[in-house]
Image (cartoon, coloured by chain):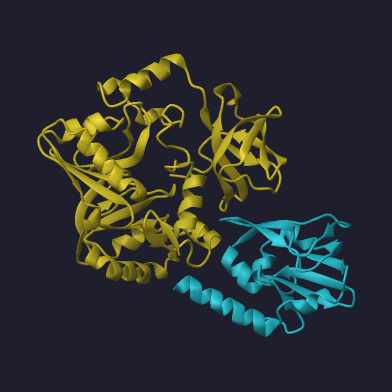
């Protein structure tokens, strides 16, 4: 479910490093919590994003959520498909629904984030909290 | 699950979009047991109902329901409600969960009539079966002939062996029924209805779809379009404010406001790009703040982003362009006629 080559944040974003580039998206857990995604607002190409800071918004029918950058870098691409098909985020959050691609300021930065096993442990704790 | 007026309620079961469109095209089942009930009995029951509400309950026949407002002395809303006339000396008021206790205190405080009021919420569960297939589904479980029950009318009878008040009412803009019964039967009736409706495509629906459905039908929600600062005139509810019925709580202020004119009026708008104007966002007209969005979001059946809000009455022209301020950015919108959605009869 959670690809092993990705790294994950506590805000439920994933990052897939590829040399000094990376793709960023939201996790399957995040899309489940949001419900039906209806709008994604992404930064312009060339925008500098900063680890932990908001780089856009994602809206479901019920709410608006901010998107937080897992690492710092410069936006090189945004996913054009999400403009007309934002529901892709619900259908394929770890694949077709990547949000942005960036050139990382420091390619070592993702190493500090959770790996798939740590993230899965993190969300199962979350699930316990909500059901308690 | 979210806490809603002290009740743990699901926002969604299978997803708001699927639930919303099931109600528009087939049927949906809602557990609305959180809704409050207040019963008024006695020789002065009608007098009390007439005094505290703004619609004319004297026009009700036995077995008829009406949408109304529970009024403050200022002609603003303590709550909105459905008034059911069970007999000449017995009325059932269906009120909002979060307002139930306040409503009851308000009714008691104004009971200068020969009437008894009971806060009877705990004695009732309520399920809403809504959508074009609602009648067919419910009919499978009752011998009561549903077809002759007209919109905003009700009767008593058994559903799957359980005594119910069966009302042809709802909060979705679709045909449908709301049934009231003793709470110990809730789980059984819920499951029986879901099983029975399954082949017709009925699915369980949560608070999320309840909100998008009522918004698409431009029905007011207490705490959003109406509260204790808004009058029926402002909220576009002149049709429930019957000054000609005689004096009632707030009627003097309502008459005064009608004569003097309004400072604000409820409008409906649709967004002109993909952005979504939501509750609380500022409405801007000609570059200036003009009011606030009271409810806003996606309209899943219409496939538009819509909303309602208050603006000065001089700005209320269908077709005129306004802006919704979204996180500091102005997004274009257009004033449209309400309701956004109306079912074909």
Quarter holding residue B80: top left
Query: Which image quarter is the N terminus of chain B in?
Result: bottom left
At x 37% / y 58%, what residue is drawn? B134
Q: Estimate the x, y position of residue A27 in percent, counting from the top left.
A: 67, 72
In the picture, measured across the screen, residue B61 lies left or right of residue B337, that is left
At x 56% / y 25%, what residue is drawn? B312
Q: Estimate the x, y position of residue B317 in percent, counting from the top left.
A: 60, 26
Q: Can residue B72 be seen in this snapshot?
A: yes
Q: How many marks?
A: 0
In the picture, measured across the screen, residue A73 lies left or right of residue A98, that is right
Figure check: A30 above or below B71: below
Query: Which image quarter is the C terminus of chain B in?
Result: top left
Q: Residue furthest top?
A: B259
Of B334 and B41, nearer the camera is B41
At x 60% / y 62%, what residue is drawn? A36
Rendered yellow, the chain in question is B
Q: Estimate the x, y position of residue B144 in percent, counting from the top left.
A: 22, 57
Q: Can residue B59 be seen in this snapshot?
A: no
Q: Estimate the x, y position of residue B117 in percent, counting from the top left.
A: 17, 42
Figure check: B133 above or below B226: below
Of B245 and B49, nearer the camera is B49
Figure check: B303 above or below A7: above
Rendered cyan, the chain in question is A
At x 68% / y 45%, what residue is drawn? B327
Quarter holding residue A24: bottom right
In the picture, measured across the screen, residue B96 lies left or right of residue A18, that is left
Of B120 and B127, nearer the camera is B120
Figure check: B50 above or below B277: above
């Amino acid at each position: 479910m959670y690809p092993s080559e990705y790294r994950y944040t506590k805000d439920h974003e994933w990052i897939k490093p590829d040399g000094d580039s990376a793709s960023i998206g939201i996790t399957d857990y995040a899309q489940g919590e949001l419900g039906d995604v209806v709008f994604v607002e992404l930064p312009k190409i060339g925008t500098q994003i900063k680890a932990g800071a908001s780089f856009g918004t994602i809206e479901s029918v019920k709410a608006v959520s901010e998107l937080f950058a897992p690492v710092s870098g410069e936006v090189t691409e945004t996913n054009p498909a999400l403009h007309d098909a934002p529901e892709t985020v619900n259908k394929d959050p770890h694949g077709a629904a990547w949000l942005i691609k960036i050139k990382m300021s420091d390619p070592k930065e993702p190493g500090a984030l959770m790996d798939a096993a740590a993230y899965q442990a993190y969300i199962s704790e979350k699930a316990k909290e909500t059901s308690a | 699950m979210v806490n809603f007026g002290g009740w743990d309620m699901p926002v969604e079961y299978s997803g708001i979009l699927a639930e919303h469109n099931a109600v528009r095209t087939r049927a949906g089942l809602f557990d609305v047991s959180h809704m409050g009930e207040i019963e008024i009995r006695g020789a002065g029951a009608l007098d009390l109902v007439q005094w505290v509400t703004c619609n004319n309950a004297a026009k009700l026949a036995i077995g008829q329901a009406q949408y109304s407002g529970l009024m403050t002395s200022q002609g603003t809303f303590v709550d909105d409600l459905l008034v059911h006339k069970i007999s000449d000396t017995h009325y059932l008021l269906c009120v909002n969960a979060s307002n139930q206790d306040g409503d009851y205190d308000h009714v008691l405080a104004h009971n200068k009539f020969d009437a008894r009021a009971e806060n009877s919420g705990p004695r009732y569960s309520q399920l809403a079966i809504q959508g074009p297939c609602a009648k067919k589904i419910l009919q499978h479980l009752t011998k009561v002939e549903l077809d002759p029950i007209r919109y905003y009318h009700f009767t008593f009878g058994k559903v799957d062996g359980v005594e119910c008040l069966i009302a042809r009412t709802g909060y979705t803009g679709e045909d449908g029924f709301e049934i009231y019964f003793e709470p110990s039967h809730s789980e059984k009736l819920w499951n029986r209805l879901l099983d029975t409706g399954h082949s017709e495509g009925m699915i369980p629906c949560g608070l999320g779809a309840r909100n998008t459905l009522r918004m698409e039908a431009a029905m007011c929600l207490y705490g959003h379009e109406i509260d204790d600062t808004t009058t029926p005139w402002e909220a576009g509810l002149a049709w429930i404010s019957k000054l000609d019925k005689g004096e009632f709580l707030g009627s003097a202020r309502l008459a005064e406001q009608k004569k003097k004119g309004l400072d604000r009026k409820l409008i409906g708008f649709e967004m002109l790009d993909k952005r979504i104007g939501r509750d609380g966002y500022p409405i801007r007209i000609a570059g200036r703040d003009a009011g606030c969005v009271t409810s806003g979001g996606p309209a899943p059946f219409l496939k538009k982003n819509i909303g309602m809000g208050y603006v000065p009455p001089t700005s209320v022209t269908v077709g005129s362009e306004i802006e919704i301020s979204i996180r500091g950015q102005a997004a274009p919108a257009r004033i449209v006629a309400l309701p956004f959605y109306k079912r074909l009869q």
